[in-house]
Amino acid sequence: MRTDARPARTAWVVLAGLVVFMLVLAGCGGGDDDSTDGGGGGDESGMLQKLGKGEGEVNLISWAGYVEPGWSKPFEQKTGCKVNNKVAGTSDEMVKLMESGQYDGVSASGNATARLVAADEVDPVNVDLVPNYKTVFDDLKNQSYNTFDDVPYGIPHGRGANLLMWNDSDVKPGPTSWDVILDPAKASKYSGKISVYDDPIYIADAAVYLKTHEPDLGIENPYQLNEEQFEAAVNLLKEQAPNVGEYWSEVEKQISGFTNGDSQVGTTWQYQYFALLEEDQPVAASPASQGFLPKEGATGWSDTWMISNKAKHPNCMYEWMNWIIEPKVNAEVAEWFGEAPAQSLACDETENPDFCADYHADNPAFWKRVYYWETPLADCGDGSGDCKDYNDWIKAWTAIKG
Amino acid sequence: MAAEAAAPRRSAGRKLAGLFHGRPRLQVGALLAGPVGWLVIGYIGSLVVLLVTSFWSVDALSGEVIQELSFDNFEALWNEPVYRDIIGRTVGIAAAVTVTDALLAFPIAFYMAKIASNRGKAILVVAILLPLWSSYLVKVLAWRTMLSDGGIINWALEPFGLNGPGYGIVAVWLVMSYLWLPYMILPIYAGLERIPDSLISASEDLGAQPLTTFRRVILPLAFPAVVAGSIFTFSLTLGDYITPRLVSSDQFIGNVIFNSIVNDQPFAAALALVPIVVMIAYLLVARRLGAFEHV
């Protein structure tokens, strides 16, 4: 009883001491102002000059379906590099994982590449050490999303368009336009059954739609939008939101949504589409006869294997980058996933002899209607004007979902 | 051999013991240095970093933090109606889950503490702890399947012409209430255990109706335990972001933090302070209600 007051007082003294210590720490933290500028590319210092012996393993970050046993096991046998793969659901996740410094490389889309370069997370790629690079399709080399200051920062993996997918027994007739999920009058028919990709980059899908349906806005590049264009796209998605059943970013979530009947129509990737077909689900997507695209065109991706500048297994990573565009392997990857290969020689190796023709692998005109993911930039990417940057996109995405 | 090896160590140990002998402050200091250091650096230190970061801003392209004082993050939090909605939704669900769990947990805990035999008590404790042995994610995904359009809940309700809640805010409330129920039952059980049976008998002997006994004797004594349990359910709900992602499309504070953390850590930090402030307020109220007096 007699000690009742004393422990309390001691506790207060300890607490006060902790607070003082905390403030001292805060002062140090605040004064620590030597922020390093992340350099904007063209920095060749970290580039590997000579290929050495493999380090025994390689840690990858990839999109679902990019690293599968079908081609990673033979790679392990050939090079002795054990493949540890981490699947990411969004470009933001990939950037975050790369920042951890624990990974050797990543299959980055165009909305991650510029950010990874600007944040100084990746090294340029010495393409002389990747013999298969020579025969990669020319229109995939030296593009704004994989080459910075004329220095290549990665190896093209393949490309494709995001799909409009629907349940064939619920959605009739098969839609040929994105209006089925974006025009409020039509979308309300499937209210609560629409499945939409959960990522700020989806705002570009609305911009692609508006490019056709509201030409007065003058949208050129759906990723570089000025105030008025951005507003229009965001408002369209705010009108869409009440009709959306689910926003997905894990592929499994969307697959279960379509399997259980919670989703009937939405945006998807080839990975989920083929996985659902495999389960005998009655899903359909824009057929080859429509060039896989709704009439407005579509957003898409052209992915690039990049190497971390903190890579602990750089030699294995180079082996991997060369392996993934080996004609046979790239053909297998492309057919398995359902995308156009990056390797021109892969077209001779596909099981389906018409595969490259079907997927327009060598048809630059087709890809004009596919808008590869890019990072939205304040200067519109070419310094031409006032565009909304990616932070604005993130904030708008939060507001859209409400 | 063993004696030889042990001899010098023993003398070093002796020396150390000598150092501590008769110095109670040093003894306590050495004993607490580890845990307190861990607490200060690991917990309070990270909170401080969070607080400091929330006043910084970020370079849009590289995501690099610009270390200059700015109130933009807090202005955005205050001015954008969407964040107010999200904070309100999160706190509302946390409160709803807490009340639901308290109502569900009290009868169970009461039965366990006062009515069940020792054997029944043991079985019930195991039954309550058992769900905690399986992965959180498995449980949420199971609920996702159950709540789906063709799931078991709709199937069971169909004969009555009813429909399950489907995915959405109700689903979040259901799943969270399920997930955190054990954290409410155990403190209440411990609190009720400590109420002597003689008090209840005395209340009866003095002529109180059962309801009066409950209202005037049991509830006041058990209330601190309820408040203690509510701290768990409330804070766990406040911080969760995976359940909302899997069984709804509604955004909670955690979801927005998750979405901002790659590109805008300062904003994520500012937002992360909201649940901390809410929790501090909650704990102060809980202290008033006596949650820390006997637990």
Image (cartoon, coloured by chain):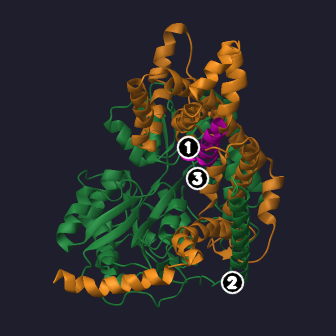
Boundaries of the magenta span: B225-242
Residue shown at the point (61%, 56%) measured from the top left: B259
> Along the polypeptide, which appears first: circle 3 or circle 2?
2
A12 on left or right of A181? right
Q: Amino acid at mark 2?
A: Asp
Q: Secondary structure at mark 2?
A: loop
At label 3, counting other C-alpha atoms closer than 10 Å, the crowd grade (few under 14, some 14-19, many 20 or more) is: some
Residue shown at the point (48%, 54%) measured from the top left: A89
Q: Nearer the viewer, residue B151 or A386?
A: B151
Residue shown at the point (73%, 54%) measured from the top left: B274
User: How far, Cα to Cα, is label 1 from label 2?
Assistant: 37 Å
Q: Position of residue A115 (x, y in %)?
A: 57, 71
C-beta proximity under 8 Å, tags 1 and 2 = no
Relative vertical location of residue A337 with respect to residue A266 in this rendering, above or below:
below
> In the rendered image of this protein, which colour is used for chain A?
green
Q: Nearer the viewer, residue A390 or B153?
A: B153
> In the rendered image of this protein, which colour is used for chain B?
orange
The residue indicated by pointer 2 is: A32
C-beta proximity under 8 Å, tags 3 and 2 = no
